[in-house]
Amino acid sequence: MEIFYLDSHSYVELCDLLKLQGWCESGAAAKTVIAEGLVEVDSQVETRKRCKIVAGKVVAFNGESVRVEE
């Protein structure tokens, strides 16, 4: 499992996290896979494209996962 650091931010939007991790090439692609129910946050399907991902959350997509830390 990879670690994503928020640095000085309090959250990252789900669609942005998919782009920053390199799991999607664009914001449009990220929004599409989220809308299709292919992304999980803490083992639950998440369909809100701009869902705020805070420290402690685990996001999974396409067999990969990342834990968000401060």
Image (tube, rainbow, N blue to C red):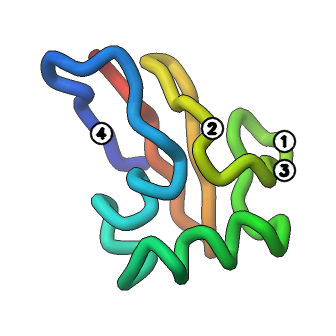
Kind of element beneath mark 2 = loop
Spatial CA distance of label 4 from label 2 is 16 Å
Please say if the residues under marks 4 and 2 sit with CB atoms less than 8 Å apart: no
> Local crowd at mark 4 within 10 Å, few (<14), some, or many (≥20)?
some
Q: Which mark is residue 4?
A: 4
Q: Earlier in the sequence, mark 2 or mark 3?
A: 3
Amino acid carrying label 1: it is Gln
Q: Which residue is mark 2?
A: 51
Q: Earlier in the sequence, mark 4 or mark 2?
A: 4
Residue visible at 51% across and 57% down? 15
The x and y percentages for residue 53 are 52, 31
Q: Earlier in the sequence, mark 2 or mark 1?
A: 1
Image quadrant in which the C terminus is located: top left
The x and y percentages for residue 7 are 15, 23
Residue visible at 62% across and 65% down? 61
Above-or-below relation of 40 to 11: below
Q: Is residue 9 left or right of residue 43?
A: left
Viewer-side residue, 38 vs 43 = 38
Spatial CA distance of label 2 from label 3 is 12 Å
Spatial CA distance of label 4 from label 3 is 20 Å
Amino acid carrying label 2: it is Cys
The x and y percentages for residue 67 are 45, 35
Q: Which residue is mark 1?
A: 44
Q: Which residue is mark 3?
A: 45
Above-or-below relation of 28 to 55: below
